Amino acid sequence: MKMLKYSSLLMLALSVMVFTGCDEEDDHDHDHDHNEITINILEPGADEVVADASDVHIHIEVEATDTNHDIDIVLHPDGDVDTKIIDQHMHDHDQKVVFEQDIDLSGYPAGTKFHLEVEACSDHDCEEKVFADVEFSIQ
């Protein structure tokens, strides 16, 4: 009888813990309503002319006041959105997400312009998005 009583109490305690966990998660989701995302495209700079097209460094930092969710990074030549040199989708819940990559653009003629675009979701359902982009060219 004592074991049955103990088992019943344990089941009740686990049920309460599971139920409470869901409540906390729901409360936590409400924090995302106030989640602010800052996208910093550190390299290349806006309107920068990159001297060495064979070694273009891409450096992006996405910071959230709460947590990040989905982040999309696209690099394409000017006027050709279908040719995606970088097409990166990241799902990361860290407060700060850093993306760095070296790419070779020497196959493009000197003077070619490129668009680096970053889109980040400020909530898990991606109802609110933040967008940043830079345009740069190569020598």
Image (cartoon, grey):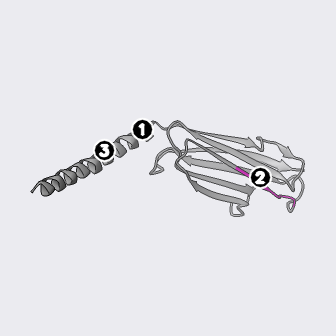
Earlier in the chain: of badge 1 and badge 3, it is: 3
Confirm whether the magenta stretch covers residue 138: no
Residue pointed to by mark 3: 23
Q: Quadrant of the N terminus?
A: bottom left
Alpha-carbon span between mark 1 and mark 3: 13 Å
Mark 3 closeness class: few <14, some 14–19, many ≥20 residues within 10 Å? few
Tag 1–tag 3 contact (CB < 8 Å): no
The percent coordinates of residue 22 (x first, y second) are: 32, 48
| Crowd tier of the residue under label 2, counting other residues whose Cα lies within 10 Å: few below 14, some 14–19, many 20 or above | many
Magenta span: 100-106
Marked residue nearer the N-terminal end (1 or 2): 1
Tell me how far mark 2 sits from mark 3, CA to CA: 46 Å
- Asked whether 101 falls inside the magenta stretch, the response is yes
Q: Please, what is the three-letter code of the amino acid marked with disc 3?
A: Asp
Q: Distance from label 1 to label 2 (Cα)?
A: 36 Å
Where residue 109 appears, x then y in whole percent?
88, 59
Residue 26 appears left or right of 94: left
Pick the residue in front: 88 or 138: 88
Q: Nearer the viewer, residue 88 or 94?
A: 94
Residue drawn where x is 29% and y is 51% of the image:
18
Residue at image x 27%, y 49%?
19
Q: Say which residue appears at 34% left-offset and 45% top-offset.
A: 26
Residue that carries the numbered disc 2 in the rendered image: 114
Tell me the tag on residue 31. 1
Q: Is residue 108 left or right of residue 87?
A: right
Question: Vertical placement of 106 versus 92: above or below?
Answer: below
